[in-house]
Amino acid sequence: MYSINDIVSYSSAGICDITDITNRSIAGISMDYYVLKPKMDQKSTVFVPVNNERLIARMRSPMNTSEANELVDSLCTIGTDWIENDNERREVYRSRITDGTPSLLAQIYKTLTLRRKELEENSRKLRSADEAFLKECEKLLSFEICNATGSTLDEVKKMIFDRCNK
């Protein structure tokens, strides 16, 4: 059970503050909801039913500093997972982003970053869906690492670059 003022990572919303636990009636059914405010988009609000185990399973404690540093280090060594079939790749990546597990996001990030570089060397571009997945993974990972380390986005980008180019 989470409490008001807890900080959680929630699926593709990223790092969120639990600002309230409120009761709402939707279609005549009254339920309690966690009210989440994503730090990436303070204009958004996410309502998660307190008794919905599937959605609650998407909530987790954010990474700590040690975990964030391990994740950054793993970006240099983690394997890639290019899926040739566009539809299958979209389905797999969408599912992994929804899951929100940092190691899965890191793998997508690295795979698509390397794929983009490979295509650019041949004067080609990453497909728009892949570009969107790459940006989403970069955003989610960066904000989580910032939250864990107290670093700015620019510092996180430099940290990743420095560690992967030793």
Image (cartoon, rainbow, N blue to C red):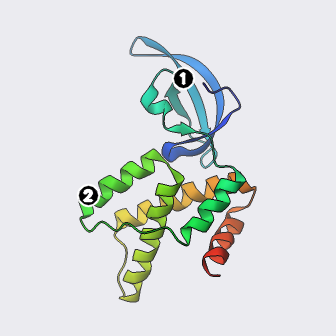
Q: Furthest-right residue in view?
A: 150
47 lies above or below 27: below
- Quarter of the figure that contains the N terminus: top right
User: Could you classify mark 2 by the number of other residues whose Cα lies within 10 Å: few (under 14), some (14-19), or many (20 or more)?
Assistant: few
Residue at figure coordinates x 67%, y 61% from the top left: 69
Residue receiving disc 2 = 88
x and y percentages locating residue 85 in the rendered image: 23, 65
Q: Nearer the viewer, mark 2 or mark 1?
A: 2
Query: Relative to 26, is 145 on the left or the right?
Result: right
142 lies above or below 75: above
x and y percentages locating residue 164 in the rendered image: 60, 76
163 lies above or below 99: below
Residue at figure coordinates x 44%, y 76% from the top left: 114
- Quarter of the figure that contains the C terminus: bottom right
Q: Using the rendered view, name the quadrant where residue 28 is placed.
A: top left
SS under mark 2:
helix
- Residue type at the position of mark 2: Glu
x and y percentages locating residue 161 in the rendered image: 63, 75
Residue at figure coordinates x 70%, y 55% from the top left: 66
SS under mark 1:
strand
- Which one is nearer the viewer's eye here, 2 or 125? 2
- How far apart are labels 2 and 1 at the CA level? 33 Å
- Residue type at the position of mark 1: Tyr
Residue at figure coordinates x 69%, y 49% from the top left: 64
Which disc, if any, is residue 4? none
User: Could you classify mark 1 by the number of other residues whose Cα lies within 10 Å: few (under 14), some (14-19), or many (20 or more)?
Assistant: some
Residue receiving disc 1 = 33
First of labels 2, 1 by sequence position: 1
